[in-house]
Image: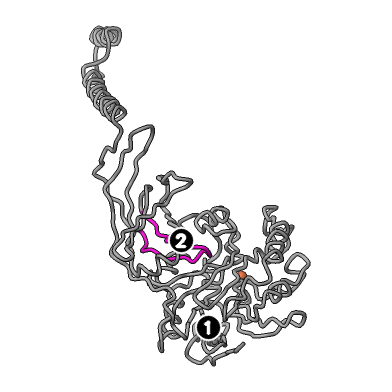
Amino acid sequence: MRSGLTSPMKNNIIGRCKLNIEQGLCFMDQISVYFKGLLATIVASLLAWHASIGGVVPLPINTKFVTAPAVFDVGDGYAVMWATDKKGMAWVTFEVDGKEYTVYDSASGTIRTDETLHAVKVDKDLFDQAGSYRVHSAYILFNFGYITFRGAEAVSQAYDFRGYEGQETIRGLFFADVHGQKEMAYQNTALLTQDAPADFVVLGGDIARDWLLTQKTFVDEILDLAVHMSGSGIPVVYVRGNHECRGAWATQMRNYFPTPTGELYFTTSYGPIGALVLDTGEDKDDDDPQYGGLADFDAYRKQHLNWIKGLRSDTFDAYEYKVCYAHKYNFNVPAQQSGENWAIPVRALGIPLTLTGHGHTNKVFSDAESGMVIFEDGGTAAGSLATFSGGQISVKTRHLWRNHRRLGRTGHVLSCIV
Ligand SMILES: [Fe+2]
């Protein structure tokens, strides 16, 4: 005989359930509804209470730092940048002459709360004087009206920072085409700075392995490298490479580099060094099949070139040393730059030297039309060291063989002086 309920019993239970449904809900459902209602009442009461007086509802949720900070030189200030594991607010603190400064990651007066990548713009002179700083973050679950649900504050260690402090000899590292090979970049940084530490770092583009798919790609491959090469303690100038023009997150990157132009090209300085930072964009025509119809660099290059031509001719007159940073070594080739030789207007600003990358080999050459000296870093994390001293700029790099495994062991040194 098949086990199971007999039809009368089945009908009886079904009948009771029907009755319960008609009357309300089963007992367990009633308990669940009761607690949900209680929770909703508590939350509503909290909201009403805080809405009446405003304030913060503390949450027992901690934010963790995903990276230490890097201090990016963005022309008219520094962007102190770091990443956290949760979205929320961020701020930087430092002290000058006994006065404490707190600067927030904010937009037009409102502190950002929905970011895990934080960029706090601080005053260069003040920050240089401070000599040390801390970064802070706090998780924000949500904020609306007069109430904010906020996690505990995370505060970093104190980081030493050294800007220009009157040194007569200044050393700048220039690394292009790292393409994700961070360990090799760190090894060559050690080689290039074994006699004296660097004063600043220039990341000359194509630092990411392939392209910028997500914010995490930027954090892992560019920000993390900037943190380690600078030790969070000297300025970093970022120059965009053609590979960093690609990928879904590429259009977001400039939001974290608050330059005076709003773009990734700008002028800046480090003591007696005046620098022109270019964004040479992609390396192929906009209609190249690789771009899938998503490249608009012809218009961008025209905008960029107009900006260069619009700079006052005396922009760099006050500086003893003048230099240009650009990713592409062939930025003087009209066919590569929407029909114009960019070296001509750059040289007209009194700049004798451009540090570049892109070709993955070393070379130094002079642009015939402008006389500009163009020094190409070896790429694949070889790195170069530019020394500014005695009125001259000298640059050297270790020769990079195509097989990067031989780097630094058998290579000779390529150098130039302007
Ligand atoms: Fe490149």
Asked whether, in this view, residue 95 is left or right of residue 401, the answer is: left
**Mark carried by residue 79:** 2
Amino acid residing under circle 2: Ala
Of residue 379 and residue 278, the one placed in the foreground of this image is: 278
Q: Is mark 1 within 8 Å of ligand 1?
A: no
Residue 402: percent from left, percent from top: 58, 82
Q: Quadrant of ligand 1?
A: bottom right
383 magenta-colored: no
Magenta region: 66-84
- The image quadrant where one finds the N terminus is top left
Of residue 62 and residue 27, the one placed in the foreground of this image is: 62
Q: Residue at x 47, y 86 (%)?
A: 169
Residue 11 seen in the figure: no
Amino acid residing under circle 1: Ala
Residue 164: percent from left, percent from top: 44, 75
Lower position in the chain sequence, tag 2 or tag 1: 2
Q: Quadrant of residue 136?
A: bottom left
Q: Quadrant of residue 299?
A: bottom right
Residue 322: percent from left, percent from top: 60, 78
* As drawn, 39 above or below 335: above
Residue that carries the numbered disc 1 in the rendered image? 386
